[in-house]
Image: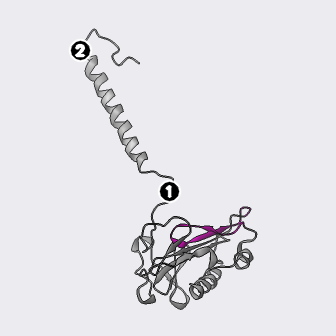
Amino acid sequence: MTLLLSTSGSRRRPVVAARMTATIALAMTLGLGLAGCTAEPATSTGPDQAAPASGGSRPDAGGEEIDGCSLLTDAEVTDIIGDNPGGVPGSEGGCTWENPDTYHSVTLGIGSPGTAVDGKLPSADPILGEPEEAADGMRFSTGEVEFASGDRYCTLRVVTSVVDRRDRPTMIRLAELVRDRL
């Protein structure tokens, strides 16, 4: 590629140099913007901002590993979302179950010890809107139920309907099971 179309005048050189500078600046901007994109999931938006552990379990303060997939039985999940290949461990002890035919799912997030001080949920993030109070100290926010289990902030989402709130009672029931088992 020729950068200078004509050498017969000095007027072309500043134009070509300006275009080249603009092209380099655009390439650098795009490169920096794309550098922020990764295949890894973003950090948690909840109060639990600890670095994720590898796999689906992580040691708690006492060194015991939390396996979120073991907190609900296959039968409990299958009754809600239908056939599924089982829970897939997520970061920080969470787990996701998904029916590959219907895309119905259950997603559980388990916070680190100390994220729900004295068994109380932390203040809601105002950017997410006003949460709706739910049973037994729980609350609904961004399509999931937030609850405390001991001193851990936890979340649970059930998706079988995206057009109404009929999954909410199921979320509460499963959150109560997790709370009792954790």
Q: Position of residue 110 (x, y in %)?
A: 52, 76
Describe residue 125's horizontal placement relative to residue 166 as left or right.
left
Q: Quadrant of residue 6?
A: top left
Q: Which quadrant would the C terminus be assigned to in this image? A: bottom right
Q: Is residue 85 above or below residue 63?
A: above
Amino acid type for the residue under numbered disc 1: Glu
Q: Residues within 10 Å of mark 1 (few under 14, many from 20)?
A: few
Describe residue 6's horizontal placement relative to residue 48 as left or right.
left
| Highlighted magenta segment, given as a residue range | 85-102
Residue 19 versus residue 54: which sits nearer the camera? 54
Q: Which residue is mark 2?
A: 10
Q: Tell me the element at label 2.
A: loop
Q: Which one is earlier in the sequence, the residue at label 1 or at label 2?
A: 2
| Mark whose residue sits in front, 1 or 2 | 1
Extreme residue toward the left, this view: 10
Q: Position of residue 71 (x, y in %)?
A: 62, 79
Q: Tell me the element at label 1.
A: loop
Q: Which mark is residue 82?
A: none
Residue under the image location 42 percent in, 80 percent down? 115
Q: Which residue is mark 1?
A: 40
Amino acid type for the residue under numbered disc 2: Ser
